[in-house]
């Protein structure tokens, strides 16, 4: 809106803000509201991204433990119409598999590990079904934002949400059409995005009067003060990548209880939507016992039938894939030689399915045949062979000599293959060996490969190896090239430095003074996740000549929550810069005990109003903590007396 020679009225000003914001549709029943009175909805985007693998149940559990009362997830549909959580069109970035979600059966997708790329503690995480997430949200009283990335699923989506009685607790976002026409009982509300530093109470009141809800989206910001302003101005929803930061504002120090749903019915059930259910079931049943000679002949006949299906020209791709899956689970010793023979088949599709089945068997006897396929003319066969080796390694790591042979073969692929996706698979597999000899080659590829996906995989593998020789190159990746396509590789570099730990601290501390906010933020959270080894270096930076360094150091120390920093932070209370004093006050509020209250009280007469407010907040927080500890000790003493 442009006004000439006229000062805009308050209503016009508010309207201009609302019109300029993005609009998100929220479907709720006409008789209920998704926004509880006087309570902001803290929505964790995909979980806790800085710590856990995105869009997984582990990430959601962690978010709820931090106190988040909503989650936002990405939704796609598989080839057999299962609604699953996945951000990208392909599963390559966040699982140990490859391929498009919409071209893959759920029975295949559920086989892949969606967690181990973020750490061994997440090994075995699977791609969740929407039904799993709906049940999780229902059990834990969460709101859910669905970022829908697949066309034409409105009817299926509404039916599933209604089945779980969650229609009053779900926001719809993304590429949805005609939701209201499909479900007349729904009323459409607009969730209006307002910039966090522009929100005003009048804006919120005006939006509410128009039956709209106000949302602050802070996906890449961890500015505590801006978030506090949004909360104080009565924003309805805040979406964040850092639920741990927002819950700190509410002084939620103790983990919240989480209720987990039972196993997915789909995971426990039989394979569906193929013509192979009978064959699969027969082979599986034969594995329940050794059986007599007749039974074994029957099993071999069924296996022969499955092998014929893989090679048949008349069988569709899905049935051939499911036949390969069934073969991979058979206990017959002849399976590996038969699959190895199929690796020489003239049809690339047959070779690919054979390589996939060998990997799924997780038998070290399959490694040599798969290594020979790394020079296959078909790139999909090469990829499937590398990922097959990767799956075998997760269960059966071979001896040292065999490891060296596999590493050499993978490094050759990484250096020489012309297809970036193949190099990417080689890079992400090499890290599983955690072999120090791979550090040099990985660094060289990290520096020289033109593809950012390959760089990201090299960074991840260097983090797995955990050798300090990689620190310099990883820091360089973290702080250089600000292009959008480099963003993921730079995140992986920060996480890799976190995995390396103490040797990374000085480099990460120096990154706190970088000119780019995203670099400072990534370094900040990396140091927090490293924890205690970071403290001494950060304490030293509290006297740095750069004020931003002093602020970031004090803030990071507060999150690490180590009492060693208390004395240094008390000195920072005298800093000439209000921002440094505020960071130190907040940090002491998190770390300190009753002994720091008196130094904090001296700042109650500070010239800066925000400093005085922060003092009041921190003293209150310390007093609450001291009282809680005293009550706990008293309760323990009473129990002992009884």
Image: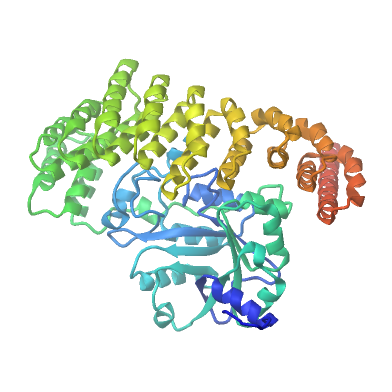
Quarter assignment of residue 504:
top right
| Picture coordinates of residue 41, whole percent (x, y) | 62, 64
Q: In the image, what residue occupies the spot 21% across and 36% down?
A: 291
Of the 4 image quadrants, the one containing the C terminus is: top right
Q: Residue furthest front?
A: 5
Name the residue nearer the viewer: 526 or 416.
416
| Picture coordinates of residue 116, whole percent (x, y) | 44, 38
Give the number of marks.
0
Q: Indicate whether 11 appears above or below 501.
A: below
In the rendered view, does 558 fall on the left or right side of 323?
right
In the rendered view, does 64 fall on the left or right side of 416?
right
| Picture coordinates of residue 305, whole percent (x, y) | 11, 45
Q: In the image, what residue occupies the spot 48% across and 62% down?
A: 134
Name the residue nearer the viewer: 449 or 622.
449
Name the residue nearer the viewer: 447 or 491.
447
Q: Indicate whether 277 appears above or below 22.
A: above
Q: Which residue lies furthest to the top in this view?
A: 401
- Report if residue 496 is visible in the image: yes
- Report if residue 395 is visible in the image: no
């Amino acid at each position: 809106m442009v006004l000439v020679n006229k000062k805009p009225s308050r209503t016009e000003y508010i309207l201009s803000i609302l019109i300029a914001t993005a609009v998100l549709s929220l479907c709720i029943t006409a008789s209920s509201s998704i926004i509880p009175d006087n309570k902001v909805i803290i929505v964790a985007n995909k979980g806790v991204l800085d710590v856990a693998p995105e869009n997984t149940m582990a990430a959601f559990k962690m978010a709820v433990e931090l106190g988040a009362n909503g989650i936002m997830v990405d939704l796609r549909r598989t080839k057999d119409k299962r609604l699953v959580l996945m951000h990208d069109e392909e599963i390559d970035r966040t699982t140990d598999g490859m391929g498009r979600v919409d071209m893959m059966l759920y029975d295949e997708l559920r086989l892949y590990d969606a967690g181990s790329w973020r750490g061994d503690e997440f090994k075995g995480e699977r791609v969740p079904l929407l039904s799993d997430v709906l049940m999780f949200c229902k059990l834990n009283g969460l709101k859910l934002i669905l970022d829908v990335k697949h066309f034409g699923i409105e009817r299926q989506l509404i039916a599933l949400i209604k089945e779980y009685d969650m229609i009053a607790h779900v926001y719809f976002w993304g590429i949805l059409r005609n939701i209201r026409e499909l479900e007349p009982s729904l009323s459409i509300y607009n969730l209006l995005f307002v910039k966090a530093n522009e929100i005003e109470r009048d804006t919120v009141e005006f939006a509410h009067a128009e039956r709209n809800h106000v949302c602050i989206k802070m996906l890449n910001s961890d500015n505590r003060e801006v978030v506090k302003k949004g909360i104080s101005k009565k924003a309805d929803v805040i979406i964040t990548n850092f639920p741990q930061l927002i819950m700190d504002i509410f002084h939620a120090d103790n983990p919240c209880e989480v209720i987990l749903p039972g196993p997915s019915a789909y995971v426990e059930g039989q394979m569906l939507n193929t013509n192979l259910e009978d064959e699969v079931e027969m082979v599986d049943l034969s594995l329940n016992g050794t059986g007599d000679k007749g039974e074994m002949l029957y099993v071999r006949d069924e296996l022969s039938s499955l092998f014929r299906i893989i090679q048949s020209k008349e069988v569709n791709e899905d049935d051939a894939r499911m036949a390969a899956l069934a073969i991979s689970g058979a206990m017959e010793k002849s399976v590996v030689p038969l699959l190895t023979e199929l690796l020489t088949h003239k049809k690339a599709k047959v070779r690919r399915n054979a390589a996939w089945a060998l990997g799924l068997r997780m038998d070290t006897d399959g490694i040599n045949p798969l290594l020979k396929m790394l020079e296959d003319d078909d790139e999909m066969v090469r990829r499937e062979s590398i990922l097959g080796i990767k799956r075998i390694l997760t269960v059966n790591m071979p001896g040292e000599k065999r490891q060296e042979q596999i590493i050499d073969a993978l490094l050759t692929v990484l250096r020489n293959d012309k297809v970036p996706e193949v190099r990417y698979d080689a890079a992400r597999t090499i890290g599983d060996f955690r072999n120090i000899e791979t550090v040099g080659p990985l660094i060289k590829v990290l520096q020289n490969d033109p593809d950012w996906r390959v760089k990201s995989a090299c960074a991840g593998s260097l983090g797995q190896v955990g050798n300090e020789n990689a620190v310099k190159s990883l820091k360089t990746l973290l702080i250089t090239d600000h292009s959008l396509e480099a963003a993921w590789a730079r995140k992986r570099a920060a996480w890799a430095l976190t995995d390396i730990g103490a040797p990374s601290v000085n480099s990460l501390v120096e990154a706190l003074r970088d000119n780019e906010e995203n670099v400072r933020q990534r370094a900040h959270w990396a140091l927090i996740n490293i924890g205690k080894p970071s403290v001494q270096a950060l304490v030293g930076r509290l006297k740095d000549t750069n004020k931003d360094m002093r602020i970031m150091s004090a803030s990071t120390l507060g999150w690490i929550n180590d009492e060693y920093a208390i004395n240094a932070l008390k000195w920072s209370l005298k800093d000439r810069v209000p921002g440094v004093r505020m960071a130190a006050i907040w940090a002491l509020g998190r770390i300190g005990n009753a002994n720091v209250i008196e130094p904090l009280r001296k700042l109650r007469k500070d010239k800066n109003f925000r400093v005085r407010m922060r003092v009041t907040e921190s003293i209150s927080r310390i007093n609450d903590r001291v009282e809680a500890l005293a009550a706990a000790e008293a309760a323990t003493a009473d129990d002992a007396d009884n």
